[in-house]
Image (tube, coloured by chain):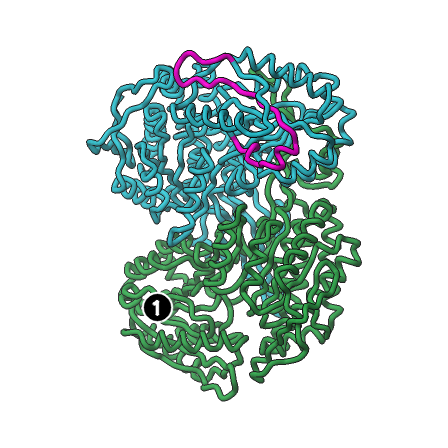
Chain colours: A green, B cyan
Amino acid sequence: MDGRFLIAGERIATGETFEGYDPAAGANIAPAFEVSREADVARACEAAAAAFDVFRETSPEDRAVFLETIASEIEALGDALIERAVLESGLPPARLTGERGRTTGQLRLFASVLRAGRFAGVVLDSPMPERQPLPRSDLRQRRIAVGPVAVFGASNFPLAFSVAGGDTASALAAGCPVVVKAHPAHPGTSLLAAQAIDAAVAKCGLPRGVFSLMQGPANELGAALVRHPAIKAVGFTGSRAGGLALVSLAQARPEPIPVYAEMSSVNPVLLFPAALANRAEALGAGFVASLTMGSGQFCTNPGLVIGIDGPDLDRFVAAAAQALEQAQPQVMLTAGIHGAYSTGVETLAGHDGVELVARGVAATACNCGQAALFSTSAAALAANPALAHEVFGASSVVIRAKDWGEVAALLETLEGQLTATLQIDADDVEAARPLLPILERKAGRILANGWPTGVEVSHAMVHGGPYPATSDPRSTSVGSAAIERYLRPICYQDLPQALLPQAVRDGNPQRLPRLVDGAFE
Amino acid sequence: MDGRFLIAGERIATGETFEGYDPAAGANIAPAFEVSREADVARACEAAAAAFDVFRETSPEDRAVFLETIASEIEALGDALIERAVLESGLPPARLTGERGRTTGQLRLFASVLRAGRFAGVVLDSPMPERQPLPRSDLRQRRIAVGPVAVFGASNFPLAFSVAGGDTASALAAGCPVVVKAHPAHPGTSLLAAQAIDAAVAKCGLPRGVFSLMQGPANELGAALVRHPAIKAVGFTGSRAGGLALVSLAQARPEPIPVYAEMSSVNPVLLFPAALANRAEALGAGFVASLTMGSGQFCTNPGLVIGIDGPDLDRFVAAAAQALEQAQPQVMLTAGIHGAYSTGVETLAGHDGVELVARGVAATACNCGQAALFSTSAAALAANPALAHEVFGASSVVIRAKDWGEVAALLETLEGQLTATLQIDADDVEAARPLLPILERKAGRILANGWPTGVEVSHAMVHGGPYPATSDPRSTSVGSAAIERYLRPICYQDLPQALLPQAVRDGNPQRLPRLVDGAFE
């Protein structure tokens, strides 16, 4: 593997390098990767800007083929991609193989979104030349790409939320060139994915500036990217501190730009009485399976479980404790994440009124997360909202409430969430009903009788939610609606056919769905 | 008229008052209006929050009837509304009568948007219980109202962009309670419109907290409104300084919220050679009619005209000068706007390389704007971008360029705009073509052979554009798509029918258009 990064098809060396890290071995790994400098960011952004007008006006079919070609190029990387990702992330091969399928699947989903054509948002209002007192013009609306997009790779999905992940797929689908700031935890995986994208750019005859990859460990690299005037939107998945820093940078620009940052969530799970009575043990085991999967390194990890105090909740806690105590330690993504997890667990354990329910099997290897389950009262949480702050990893807190009134009050105090989960049986429906409006105000997805950690890539998915779950609850980072982030509407009034874009011309040459005078054709 | 403001149906007096102002007479006018305090803001916002869960779940049909009832109540105000608006704005009765029609028309347009049902964004993905390796859940997406919205009335449309204007109509349509901060330039007009809305709230049996009106001259009142935690989005039309102040306040909240601020635009007009050769005189006259209408107090006012230097451009300038010199002075909206206009014109006149082409008829009455037309070179503008900053009122600058290459370079340096206008004949199409991509990046609406000052209220309209035309180019403040601002998506996964909202239940009881497994039903 050659450690040079990529600007518009050109491989770049700067002489300054950094290395990847194998968290399972606790050691750096070859090769050395060249570090991108601010001047490289500028070159990549300028190349993206130069490619923009051509790329955004490629036909939906051409962009669909481009996305499918990226998917094929990723598959063509074969085992090398999985092996490198395993090495750099500590995640098991089966998980990463599945994640690769998710990555190529969402590229192909966006190809289908392009072919369906609704993304273009074509709306036509017919002229009314005879209208009194004033005629109505010929008005044609479509949506165009916002401009070059900066994408920040996430550490916890080195494929599906990284270089060729959802943000890149949706931005490219929209017609936005992409400059990726790779996550420094997986530089080799990032470079392989970048080479696949660049190969697809070349094969499809697109301007090479459509894609560039920046590499380096310093936050300043990402800051330079967000500050560059050519960048018109930002996609980010990561920590709250990181996301908020990017939002601040983006707002301080001479031209502020939107940042879609998916940040922090504890994903409350509500245990209702009939469900608890009927299946407390199964719920406890299912909860721990969701909590400890992937060492708990999911933004949808169930970090808060709420139930009414009593014997059935005791059964749930006992079953969860039993399962958790058998949870094997799993290597975490980076030494930094492992350290933050350990600190977070210690801090939780140190709070007054917080009881340690169980720990997982203690780690003997390096960077391994030891699962942790706590319990406290709703009153303690009300007194200290920090108990409901995310500890990234397999850590969760069971909240014992007196009654549903106390739960409702507690939910009102929670910050915005990606998900809220109901464990309900038929007899719980009436108890759950009054909580639904609160949950709708607090979360992007409400699910029943499952666990929040699975996020389907589909049309109806919402992976988003009120602040601080995300910086912008009007969109989703998973599923086909993610393309909306990178589009803006534009209206053409009385333009001659020859100057109109294909999307809104008479005869509908791109065969797009069109809303004409308020009704779909 | 009783000068008390309105909180959730209750008329409030605080003892502190301010008065309206008749700009034509240059004198304050009775009655005294009570000034809202921060505690009133809090009460109004809390009432809005308390009304939110009920109001957002009213059926689309019920909200449609509510919007239509507001329109009827506004019409029932009769001449009193027009007379008060004339007095407070200096605008002529015919204009305000037309604006009332626009106001009631857009309320009824949003009623039709609700009945069409696309706003609800219903997307269903069918469950796949047998899918390998994992089953797919039942996923149902809809859009819900974001929460209580703060609306700031604009001075220049005392009806259509004010208390019952587009922001209020679209927010109420979405299901958001609204707290309006009235523009202090027309407190009486504002109160009349507010009473109409409140009467509709009562007639429709809605929670009275759905609407409140705050009155007062201090910026701090609006700041308190934007800072209140119950407020989840802001609609604003006004100055760049005002809009940016609200954006800063909104970003600095513990929970940042979106601000839809429509701010400043000079709306470039490009004069192409064949059009100039064929109709320079008609273009000059048409331009001045657009420029001076309503004393130029439109955000779509043509403040920048660009052509290739030469005899045909001279003809245009001569015709424009002749028309402008006959333009009668018209009273401006406020003494402050008149002062800022006079200062802006003086500042423009003082720039090196800027030539005064013509002034309108000098004013003899108070607060009257005297139209102004300047000319300069593209090189001078390139050297001093401030020449292309908005002077709110009937002031415009003609830019003489050497060639289309220079025009393209100039357009690239322009800030974001609401509109861009092409004056083109058939022979101009090829000259215009290479500029279209630049204009698409710069503006929200591109029009040909008209003038930008007319903004149709319809489905395809985009009244928006890149910063600083607006703070958020992903939406429009005019037309049916404005409802999108105040909605966010939410996904329900495997929820029992009894807990699902009507919008996504089996059998489609609200008869909404639904995207099922990627295709419209």
Instruction: Say which amino acid is labelled 1.
Output: Leu
Q: Residue furthest left?
A: B15
Quarter where residue A165 is shown: bottom right
Q: Can residue A115 be seen here?
A: no
Relative image position of residue B291 (x, y in whole percent)? 55, 21
Point 55% across, 26% down: residue? B301
- Percent across and percent down for residue B185 are 36, 26
Residue at 46% x, 84% y: name it: A326
Query: Could you classify mark 1 by the number of other residues whose Cα lies within 10 Å: few (under 14), some (14-19), or many (20 or more)?
Result: many
Q: Which residues are magenta?
A: B361-390
Tell me: residue A279, above or below residue A231.
below
Q: Position of residue B222 (x, y in %)?
A: 35, 39
Q: Residue furthest bottom?
A: A364
Q: Is residue B360 above or below residue A296?
A: above
Q: Is residue B382 magenta?
A: yes
What residue is disc 1 on?
A387
Which of the chains bears the disc numbered 1? A
Q: Give the residue at x 33% y 74%.
A: A375
Quadrant containing the C terminus of chain B is top right
